[in-house]
Each structure stands twice: as C-alpha cells, then as structure tokens.
C-alpha cells in the first residue's frame, strides 16, 4: 500500500513538470506519462502511447541524429537500468508520418534499499524548434559558397566543415571533422597568429588577417581568415570563415610582371617618352631618350607638369593637347614646337594615350624629334619657290614628284574643299601647269593686277602663302595639268 501511495505522490509531482516524463515498469509496461510527454508525442491519452515498449515501437519510429535506427529504444535501455543523458532522437508517428518531433532524452533509474530498480523514468525535452533552426543553419552553412569551418571551443576540434572549404583546400570531410585546430590548422601562417590563438582560447572574435594554409597535397593557399564565436546548441564554438586570396595573388603577380615589362620597355625605347598623371599632367617618369634629346634630367622634370618645366613653346597648343588627351584618351601624332633645356626650339611629333597602371590613370606621351625633317622640307620648298620664277621647263611628271615629296599632316577644319570660282579654278589649273602670271594674263585676256588679285583670293581660300604650296595643293586635290605652258 505504501508503494502505491508513493507512486501516486510521484505522479502528482511530475504531472506539472514542463519536461516530459514516462514511467516504465521492469516488465516494460508503460505505467504513466505526464501531459508534457503526451504532447511531445502528439497524443492525448496514455493508451495512445501503447501499453508496453513493443506497442510503443509499433506506433512510433525513432531515429538517432546520426540517421541510425536504434536496436534498442531508449525506453528499453531504461528498463535495462542504463543511465544516459542528452540522447537526441527524431520521433515519427507511424499513423501520421507528417508528425515529427525531436526529443532530447535522459534516463532516471531509482533503486530501493536492496538495490533493485524501484522507479524507471524516461525524461524528455522537446527540441524540435532547436532542431529545425539547426537544420536551417546546416543547410545555409553547407550552401554558403564562402569556405567555413566550425570548431568546438571545449576541445578545439572541428565539428562542421562546408563544401567551400573542402573545395578550396582539397581536404575530404573525414580528414577535417574531429581533427583539432592544430591538426588541420586553419590559422597556419597567420600574420598575427599569437593574437588569433589567444582570442580562440578566450572564445573572442578573431579579426581578419592573412594566412597561408597547408594543403593535403603539400601545397599552400593564401587566404584571409576570421573567427566569430557562435553557439551550436549549448556548445560554444568558433565559426572560421575564409576568403581565397589565390586569384588576387596571381593577379598581383601578373600585374607586377606586366608593370616590370612596361617599365623595361619604357626605359629602353629609343624615342623620348614620358609618363604623367592624367588629371594634372604631373610627370612621374621619363626615359633616357628624353634626357638625351631634350637635355632635361629627372630632377628637373619628374614631379612637375610640362607647363612648369616650360617644355612647350606655345602654351595654347599645350592646353589644347592636354584637353584633347583628357577628353578622348588618345591623340595621334601632332606637330608642335618644344623647347630644349638650353632654350633652343625643336620641331616634334607628339602622340599620347591614356593607360591604366594599378588603380591609377596616366597619359603616356611619345615625343619624336622631326627638326631635321622639317628643315629639309623647308629647304625643298625654298628651292621650289626659287625656280618658280621660270617654270616653263618643269615637266608634268617632275611637278607631280615634287608634290608627292610633301606629306602634310591633317589640316584643322572639316576637311571640305574650298568653294572656288570658275576664274580661280582656271588660274589654279594654269599655276599647277607651271604658267607664270604674265602668261596667265595673256591666256585669259586679263590684266596682270587682276591675275594677282585672283591669285591672292585663291591663296586665302586654300590656306597657303606661296605659289609652290598652291601647286602642291592642286596636285594633291586632283587638278589636271592640261595646259602646256605660255
């Protein structure tokens, strides 16, 4: 009678507990379950659990968290007198497969004075919400492309690893899970390893730092590693995340090699070349050819703009050139006059192109000295001008060759031919044929002054100043030499 009273009092005590409690008899009969235990199975009455362990097994399927179906249900282990705790199982109702619970179980085995079991209880907590949260975390963790590892702080062993880390390092999962942080060293070669290890032992945040991981194939991998404390259930852990620096390192190496090749070519090119910042045109580098041609050394040019060094003779031309480079990023050969260090002036052909070096934008200027060529052209034109006083002996072929000797750069403007009057075209045709003013006047029945006035108007329209230049312009623009002379 006393035992029944004790058992009745025990049931009263456990009835109001938030934890689920199932009392089992030594013969595997289910004697009692409080409301919390019933609710954790989705039932309302004790008989819905089953009369004994075998009936319970038919109605509820259990599976451990490692996906292994137990040979002995926890209820059977209680009857056998086994003491256990924190056993997590998934519980499914056979008649309603959609109903699923996750229980965290522990056993209670009380004995009488003779050492025989007097109270066998299975105590449970519903951890379904926690399990669902863990499942969501697990799915997110595994799907995250960023490499990551979770390390348990109590023993510094890795408990989770995602596919990103395995792919980055070449490890297999079994070679990481269960290994200590020193066996699979996620802080290998860390720039501030002492700080990282100290924070790991304290369970504090590990700031981002570069590291060089050892790979299973004997290689290494440059990464940025950081650690963030998290809780996995009731276990304090450290979440290590990684950013792969290998591509960046390769890009940096390629960029450095490219810059080295550029610097070598820049230094050795025989044409004067300078590099300037695009926004201010401050010169950052010159080559040896620049010093040889213009006389300026690095100390007088680098760090200053062309305007400050007085390199350009015409400031307006410099401003137009720099504006064009900044606007279009490319200027082909343009004839300008530049100043030597000794003050002498040089005819030059200047080209520029915008270039990206690292994260900065520069203008690369190539300066070709054409002083000798221009002097030769001027001498040729003077010679042509000298003989134009008597051009009756010029042959058609010779004038064509003289015209081809001059290859002027593109003229400013829209490139359209000037509008010439009929009389101006007649005079230009005769000039191109080598006919002098007197002969033109006779042939066109005009006075000499009238011919000269038409010629002056013609020169203005053509943008030339000399008879020889008019001849060359006419030949370049297809005027036929159909007059044979005076």
Image (spheres, helix red, strand yellow):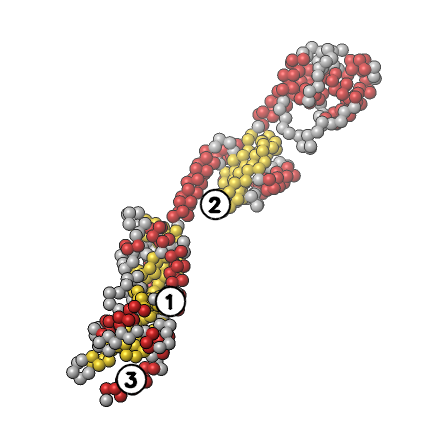
Q: Using the image as rendered, state which of residue 172 and residue 35 is in the foreground.
A: 35
Q: Secondary structure at mark 3?
A: helix
Q: CA distance from mark 1 to mark 3?
A: 32 Å
For image coordinates 39% across by 65% down, the residue present is 98
Q: Using the image as rendered, state which of residue 115 and residue 166 is in the foreground.
A: 115
Residue denoted by label 3: 10
Residue denoted by label 2: 358
Residue 82: percent from left, percent from top: 22, 73
* First in sequence: mark 1 vs mark 3: 3
For image coordinates 24% across by 75% down, the residue present is 28
For image coordinates 65% across by 13% down, the residue present is 397
* Quadrant showing the C terminus: top right
Is residue 208 shown left or right of residue 109? right
Pointers 1 and 3 in contact (CB under 8 A)? no
For image coordinates 30% across by 83% down, the residue present is 11
Q: Secondary structure at mark 1?
A: loop
Q: Using the image as rendered, state which of residue 130 and residue 338 is in the foreground.
A: 130
| On screen, residue 482 above or below 184 | above
Q: CA distance from mark 1 to mark 2?
A: 65 Å
Label 3 environment density (alpha carbons within 10 Å; few <14, some 14–19, many ≥20)? few
Q: Secondary structure at mark 2?
A: loop
Answer whether residue 127 is visible to the viewer in this image: yes
Label 1 environment density (alpha carbons within 10 Å; few <14, some 14–19, many ≥20)? few
Is residue 451 shown left or right of residue 56? right
Residue 114: percent from left, percent from top: 16, 83
Residue denoted by label 1: 96
Residue 209: percent from left, percent from top: 38, 56
């Amino acid at each position: 009678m006393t035992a029944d009273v004790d058992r009745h009092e025990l049931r009263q005590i456990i009835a109001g507990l938030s934890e689920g409690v199932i009392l089992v008899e030594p013969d595997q009969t289910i004697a009692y379950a409080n409301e919390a235990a019933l609710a954790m199975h989705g039932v309302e009455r004790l008989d819905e659990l089953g009369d004994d362990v075998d009936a319970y097994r038919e109605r509820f399927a259990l599976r451990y968290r490692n996906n292994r179906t137990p040979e002995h249900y926890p209820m059977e282990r209680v009857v056998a007198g086994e003491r256990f705790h924190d056993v997590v199982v998934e519980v499914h109702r056979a008649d309603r497969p959609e109903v699923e619970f996750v229980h965290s179980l522990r056993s209670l085995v009380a004995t009488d004075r003779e050492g025989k079991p007097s109270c066998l209880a299975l105590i449970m907590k519903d951890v379904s919400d926690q399990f669902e949260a863990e499942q969501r975390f697990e799915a997110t963790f595994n799907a995250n492309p960023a490499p990551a590892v979770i390390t348990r702080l109590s023993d510094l062993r890795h408990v989770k690893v995602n596919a990103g880390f395995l792919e980055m390092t070449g490890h297999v999962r079994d070679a990481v899970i269960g290994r200590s942080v020193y066996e699979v060293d996620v802080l290998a070669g860390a720039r501030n390893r002492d700080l990282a290890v100290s924070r790991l032992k304290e369970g504090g945040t590990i700031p981002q730092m570069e590291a060089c991981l050892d790979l299973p194939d004997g290689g290494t991998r440059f990464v940025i590693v950081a650690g963030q404390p998290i809780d996995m259930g009731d276990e304090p852990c450290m979440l290590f995340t990684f950013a792969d620096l290998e591509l960046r390192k390769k890009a940096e190496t390629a960029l450095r090699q490219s810059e080295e090749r550029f610097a070598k070519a820049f230094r050795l090119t025989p044409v004067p070349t300078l590099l300037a910042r695009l926004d201010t045109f401050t010169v950052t580098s010159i080559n040896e050819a620049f010093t040889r041609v213009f006389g300026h050394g690095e100390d007088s040019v680098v760090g200053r703009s062309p305007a400050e060094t007085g390199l350009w003779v015409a400031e307006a031309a410099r401003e137009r050139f720099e504006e064009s480079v900044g606007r279009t990023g490319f200027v082909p050969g343009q004839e300008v006059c530049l100043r030597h260090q000794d003050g002498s002036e040089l005819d030059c052909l200047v080209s520029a192109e915008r270039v990206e070096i690292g994260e900065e934008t520069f203008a690369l200027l190539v300066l070709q000295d054409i002083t000798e060529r221009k002097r030769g052209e001027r001498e040729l034109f003077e010679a042509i001008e000298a003989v134009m006083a008597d051009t009756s002996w010029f042959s058609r072929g010779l004038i064509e060759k003289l015209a081809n000797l001059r290859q002027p750069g593109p003229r400013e403007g829209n490139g359209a031919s000037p509008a010439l009057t009929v009389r101006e075209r007649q005079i230009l045709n005769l000039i191109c044929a080598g006919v002098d003013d007197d002969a033109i006047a006779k042939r066109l029945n005009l006075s000499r002054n009238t011919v000269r006035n038409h010629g002056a108007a013609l020169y203005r329209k053509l943008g030339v100043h000399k008879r020889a230049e008019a001849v060359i312009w006419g030949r370049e623009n297809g005027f036929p030499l159909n007059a044979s002379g005076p």
